[in-house]
């Protein structure tokens, strides 16, 4: 189902409070600091330790795992000029992806989509602030994300990743998020193909349930991907200089990816909505086939049973008018002739109507 | 059903008359007056008393509960330059949400959505005039609204609410209205999920009725939310200076909320329209299953019954041609062999066709 | 059905001829002339008499009922510079609402919708020319229109109606047309609600017919209302000065009304298209229910009938292999035990499958 | 079915070749030359004869019937600067209507729609070049077109048709094409109404076929009409001076017609798509009705038949436990009482469930 | 199914690696070099040999068949300034058609659609770089493409193809790609027509499968054609001078083709989606017809069988109350009268309800 987290009606806007959210675990603060020459990685226990290490001449990627520590957020907000409304959106984890342009920084909300180690599909909100010299990311849950590849590339120092500014890091993170959509879509696509075969071969109630599940999942992926395109489009068209021209070319590539993702999602939606019709038609066809057999058997044998019933009646044959047929020498044979004639006649009639 | 209140065809435009509306109760006038230092709250019996207390140097929130008192409205209109057509729209409580820009003030119509203490979902029109130093709101019914939280915040004086102008109050009121949509949507979402399970488990006529009810409710929420977005968008893009820049950032947040609401409403509509198909498919599948059993039983036993009927006939066995089988020593056993062969044959035939 | 009146392919454009239209009745010419001080109302037999009375310093509302008098139209066209193509559109009464901007005047086609005294819903084309000092309206049929209220207001002289120019009269007429949509929509809405209940309670073929009728009617109302919005929008945005600024505020109100009408029409269309699905589902559910009963009864009794038929066979019991059961002391009781066991077994089987 | 004519993949663009088109008949060249004073009409055997007669000071309407003569087209192309790609489109008769703007002339492709003398609906491509002083039209088949009325008007010299330039002739031809849509739509509308009644009264397989035929026809008319609007809109907005201002007013009228046509086509599509649902619902309702009768009869008589079968069994009544009922004095009457009770009970049960 | 090839999440952008693509075969390099006077065609084993032959004063069409040779691509990229992201898109063969504008060249991705010699429909990505003096194309598989006609025309030197620059070659290639859509659509169209007839005549499960197959194919063609239009539109509107004005006229023709293709694809989609409904309706109608026969036969004979069963009961006729009918002289005849009356009555009843 569509998750809904909202701050309680009646609370003040921009008021940070997580007690009505269920994220009580401690936040984990980590810093990834680099320039072309050096890389530093570390986890910190407190905001103050982080600040000591912070170096505005390098690229600082501050990552917060878990949204439970409001005090930390307040401090971050103060130090880096993060707008109160934006911080509220960080906590309110059912935001749709969006891009917001503040004076001091950009605020981006996006949706990570990935398979957990248990092969479960997870949706997790990623909130990102891009300022001069820093990228601050907020993740809902600690322990897993889709950025290991980005970290590996930064550590290795190969390619030009380390020589770029925070805007390129932002691109790299968004690109990593987009890239995760493809394996998810592939699994969905395989699922749809399986469903198709199942529907045509042996439509069952279970297929219906899976089909509905699949449609709901697609709806969710769709909700996560459409607004993502707007986000990227806004970043691409940025003219404040916060995004360098070279990075914009990379963002265009990323934009192409999300366009392709949306394209595939829409195609899948088209396919699955056709599948519901297919199910109906397939079930209708099966019912028709079954009815045909029932009708053929009933139509042939019910009249015959009546005839047999007639000659099973006990009318007193002393009266010459009462069932004289029973006494005919060839009565039984005549009965079978009649029965066969009727049966074959019915059969031919139905054959002509193409029911067999 | 969609409510329709319209002024009778043929009445002059801008003519205030409530006798053809059913709101005859007395209007309740209340004033909430504040600036950074002080707050005043009070109810008044007459417009004149209100005017005495009115202080243009503070923010004056005049709230009218109940639309029965036309005289009062005329006086308000005169004093605060409320346009006659706008006042007519206040009375005509089936307006769609809209924003209108008059020289002296802004006129906003919006739709409040909330659960009454009896857990009933209510739709109530809120009409709002925003002028220099005042906000005038009109509510259909007295006694309940969604603004208690706004009042609490103003009374407490915490935060910056009291230090802002009337435009911020307008934002706060609109935000309170938007916030009420979320719990309503949550209840709807739970309802849809219940329906889904019911449809897949045991589709009944009642489920159908509830599903239809749910669709109608969504249609109503949709009608209330879509135009709301335009209203907020117009306010955000206002360039007359009546809305301060700082407030516009807050309105953008509010705009995000309504976008999210519309997003969810559309997803729900998608889901429910899929549910109708699901119902059809589910019923079709059940009918198919039932028919299969009927067909299997009929197809096996109807021919057998015919055979039994044949040997129940009373043909005169004096003729050697008449039912000699009856006199065979193993006739009965042969009959059962035939019957079993036929039954098993049918069973295998249907098994091969995957009906069992 | 959608009415189609078109001038025969091959006739010259702008050629006035009504012989292939079925409106042969005499046109009725009436004049409503007013300024702030005076009002004059009158019917005229000929165009010349009208011209004598015509006074360009006042507002002249010339109304033509019935489109049969081509000579009159030609004279009007000449005197008031009405474009030949516009006059052709007046005659061709299946125009969609439109606004056309000529040098000398505005040409507006709109669709009146009202209940006749016989409670029948009528669609009637209203063609209107707005020039300096005059409004000329053409109605299809004489005797009834929706403008009595406008006339009453002009006669009474209350309000500001009489102090305004022809552009305000145009607004007043258009507003009267719009206002007539609401009662029509209300009747339609009640009809839809009745249909809903009928569908859920006892769907019959008649409900289907009414539903279809309702959909067709909505389609017609829709065709009449959508282009109306464009007409009003064009009038509102007019910058030739023919529409005064003050009138444009009133037109905005009128535009809101038509927006609301379209909104309701679309909601109704949504509802009715959902109703067709509801019908299908409801019928499917009923068929399912009926089939269940048939299947239960057949499945229980057909096998039992076969058993009874078996013991009704006449095999010669002289052979000890032929139906020895018949001679058993408790054979009959054993038969009933068997029958009851089978029946109850079937019943439990079906119960487990939730068919009862 | 949608016709597809395309030049074979791999042929050069702008290469004139009709051997893979099936139009091998000789082209017929005719000229209609006029100015305000004189009219000349004639057919020519060769392009050279035509050229002799051609007079650039008058309006020359050159009409080519049949597309078989490539040599002629090449010469025309050379003489009148017709672009090679445009000429290719002339031959390729499955173009969608379009407007193309070349330096020397305008190229318009449109679709004529008319009933042949055999009451068959024909679609025929009309290609038209409008240059200074000439209009060149290409028709697929000779012998019939929709322009007789235009010719009549030009011959008669009444109205202003002869006093205008080639741009007005273009308008007149396009208008004649549009006008032909109305009778076609009227026939279609009547057909839809017949289908509706048939569907509600007695839905048969034939109705289904006709309905599908009707949908396909509408699809074709739609494909012919939608792009036509763009064509007219481009002509109306032309600012090269090739279309005179006065003619643009006439084109606006023509544009209104095509808008109205599209409007009707869309309404018809709406109606027919609703009809498919209606068919399904109607068939569903009929099946339901039939099933009800089957169920009622079966449910009443199958149990009764079982009871009768029981008392037709031949258990040896020497044992007092075997069917003592048979020997009861009122056994037969008791049987009928039982049977009637069961039958009436079933009947009442089904009555209560509203199946009768 | 929709193919999905994506670079593994976590690889760096613009990193050329084909090891996770399944295209391991050697790439084939060929050059087609021409100007107005001369043509050269040749295949090369290495990039260096190619470079030797490369002559910037002529038009060089470098074609790479097979995407396995990453080294080659890197060299090409370096020499001709092909952007790393573009080269990545070349490898990633499930791109949607797109146009990208780099400083040094244009990058176009398009989708070839053609029947293989084995009559199988193939989709193959064509990537094309257009720079000053060169066109570089990348094809997925070697051995077959749709460009033989282009090559033939270039070799022959007829027409103006050889006198133009690389931009015209690009047009010629794109046009060849578009032209291949038409025969594919024709085959699809024939398939749809066959399906229609099959659906109306004898709907079977196989028809359903084919219909679904057809829908899926259309979806794929649609995905390949829609973005193609944007590509052409971007090329047409190019203002960098890389596309000459004369070529833009040809591109407009190509744009018309793709518009026509999209038009046909949409019509086909419309038709096939109608066919699914048709199938449902057709099956529903057949089921209805079959049910009618079953109901008629059952309704007539089940009650009769009951009557016959009654007179087959063995009540002891010693009691005068027990089945005295059996002893009536005309009992049997009376039975038949009753049976015929009931049968004919039922028949008439059903006739009146229009079931026969």
Image: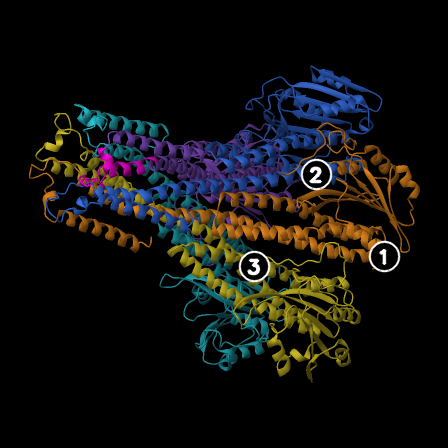
Chain colours: A orange, B blue, C purple, D cyan, E yellow
Contact (Cβ within 8 Å) of mark 1 with mark 2: no
Asked which secondary structure carries label 3, the reply is: helix
Q: Position of residue D231 (x, y in %)?
A: 57, 60
Location of residue C198 with respect to B37 vertically, above or below: below
| Same chain for the residues under marks 1 and 2 in the image | yes
Graded by Cα atoms within 10 Å as few (under 14), some (14 to 19) or many (20 or more), the crowding at tag 2 reads some
Contact (Cβ within 8 Å) of mark 3 with mark 1: no
The magenta span reads C300-327
- At x 80%, y 50%, the residue is A170
Q: Earlier in the sequence, mark 1 or mark 2?
A: 2
- Left or right: C91, with B24 as reference point: left
Task: Report which quarter residue C161 is drawn in.
Answer: top right
Queried whether the magenta region covers residue C323, the answer comes back as yes
Label 3, label 2: how far apart the Cα atoms are: 49 Å
For residue E237, say whether it is visible: no
Towards the viewer: D251 or A58: A58
- Residue occupied by mark 3: D232
Task: Give the number of the mark in front: 3 or 1.
Answer: 1
Label 1, label 2: how far apart the Cα atoms are: 35 Å
- Residue occupied by mark 2: A94
- Left or right: D90, with E246 as reference point: left
- At x 69%, y 65%, the residue is E108
For residue D107, say whether it is visible: yes
Q: Chain of mark 2?
A: A
Residue A99: mark: none
Q: Chain of mark 1?
A: A
Asked which secondary structure carries label 1, the reply is: loop
- Residue occupied by mark 1: A157
């Amino acid at each position: 189902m569509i998750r809904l987290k909202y701050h309680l009606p009646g609370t003040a806007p921009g008021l940070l409070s997580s007690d009505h959210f269920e994220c009580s675990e401690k936040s984990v603060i980590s810093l990834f600091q680099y320039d072309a020459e050096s890389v530093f990685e570390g986890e910190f226990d407190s905001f103050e330790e982080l600040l000591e290490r912070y170096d505005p001449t390098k690229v600082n990627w501050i990552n917060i795992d878990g949204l439970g520590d409001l005090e930390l957020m307040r401090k971050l907000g103060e130090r880096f000029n993060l707008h109160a409304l934006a911080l509220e959106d960080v906590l309110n984890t059912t935001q749709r992806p969006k891009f917001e342009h503040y004076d001091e920084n950009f605020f981006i909300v996006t949706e990570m989509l990935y398979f957990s180690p248990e092969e479960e599909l997870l949706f997790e909100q990623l909130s990102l602030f891009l300022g001069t010299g820093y990228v601050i990311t907020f993740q809902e849950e600690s322990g897993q994300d889709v950025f290991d590849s980005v970290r590996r590339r930064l550590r290795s120092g190969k390619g030009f990743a380390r020589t770029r500014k925070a805007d390129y890091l932002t691109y790299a993170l968004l690109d990593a998020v987009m890239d995760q959509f493809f394996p998810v879509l592939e699994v969905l696509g395989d699922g749809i193909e399986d469903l198709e075969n199942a529907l045509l071969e042996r439509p069952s109630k279970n297929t219906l349930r899976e089909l509905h599940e699949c449609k709901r999942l697609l709806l969710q992926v769709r909700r996560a991907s459409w607004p993502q395109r707007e986000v990227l489009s806004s970043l691409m068209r940025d003219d404040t200089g916060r995004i360098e021209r070279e990075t914009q070319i990379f963002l265009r590539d990323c934009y192409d990816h999300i366009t392709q993702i949306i394209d595939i999602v829409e195609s899948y939606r088209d396919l699955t909505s056709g599948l519901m019709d297919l199910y109906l038609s397939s079930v209708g066809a099966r019912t028709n086939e079954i009815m045909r057999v029932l009708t053929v058997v009933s139509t042939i044998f019910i009249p015959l049973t009546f005839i047999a019933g007639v000659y099973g009646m006990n009318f007193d044959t002393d009266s010459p008018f009462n069932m004289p047929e029973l006494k005919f020498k060839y009565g039984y044979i005549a009965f079978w002739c009649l029965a066969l004639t009727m049966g074959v006649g019915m059969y031919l009639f139905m054959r002509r109507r193409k029911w067999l």
